[in-house]
Amino acid sequence: AADTVRAGREATAFAAGHLAQPFTVITARATAHGRGRVPRFYAFVRTSEGRDLGELLVAAGLARALGVRRGTPEGVHRDEHEQRLRDLELAAALRGAGAWRDSQPETLVERRALLRAELAELDALRLEVLGLDDPDAPVDPNRAPVEALQSLPGIGPTLAARIVAHRPFTDADDLRRVPGIGPATLDAIRDRLVFEERDAP
């Protein structure tokens, strides 16, 4: 735990140093994968010298190359971008840079296998709690989190967020007032919708 805190402080100081001069933030209209209920979106940070902050952090051993699913603003395909970050991460690990200096390479295979098992168990539990383990489970648009709403046909992060913003709904047809939900989308999700009685105030 102490090593993790130290690495976090190093990463904070590293980023602050590179962002001391004017920098640029380029947002991308794409969902960034995460385990939280609130959608996350990509943002590319360029230093005053035009360098990518994410790449700098990974190369310094102060960040991991995880969850990359987006091409760069310069047009580099997402797969190539992801592979570059993974190469930078590997190089940092081989040098023992940043947080990697505390790593124990001889335990890597065992630890990564354990991590994958734990993440799979957490994913299964999360889906069960949210009712997403059953792809045909009914969804209450007045109560469901955005992840559950996104299990509906044709409902992505943007529409899910709009549904939450326009609650409450009296019935399925009431969802027509959500921008982006037209007759075709409503027909596709109608059979999956359920409207449970809300508790009286």
Image (cartoon, rainbow, N blue to C red):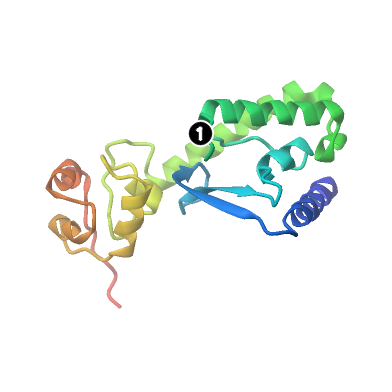
**Residue 99 in the image, given as x and y percentages of width and height:** 81, 40
At 46% from the left edge and 54% from the top edge, which residue is drawn? 38
Viewer-proximal residue among 10 and 105: 10
Does 50 sit above or below residue 71? below
Does 4 sit above or below residue 83? below
Does 4 sit above or below residue 115? below
At 79% from the left edge and 47% from the top edge, which residue is drawn? 4
At 86% from the left edge and 29% from the top edge, which residue is drawn? 95
Q: Is residue 94 left or right of residue 126?
A: right
Can residue 8 be seen by looking at this rendering? yes
Binning the other alpha carbons within 10 Å of mark 1 as few (below 14), some (14 to 19) or many (20 upward) gives few
Q: Is residue 35 left or right of residue 92?
A: left
Q: Which residue is mark 1?
A: 75
At 38% from the left edge and 52% from the top edge, which residue is drawn? 146
Q: Amino acid at mark 1?
A: Gly
Viewer-proximal residue among 68 and 48: 48
**Residue 145 in the image, given as x and y percentages of width and height:** 39, 54
Q: In which quarter of the view is residue 135 placed?
A: top left
Check disc 1 and report its element: helix, strand or loop: loop
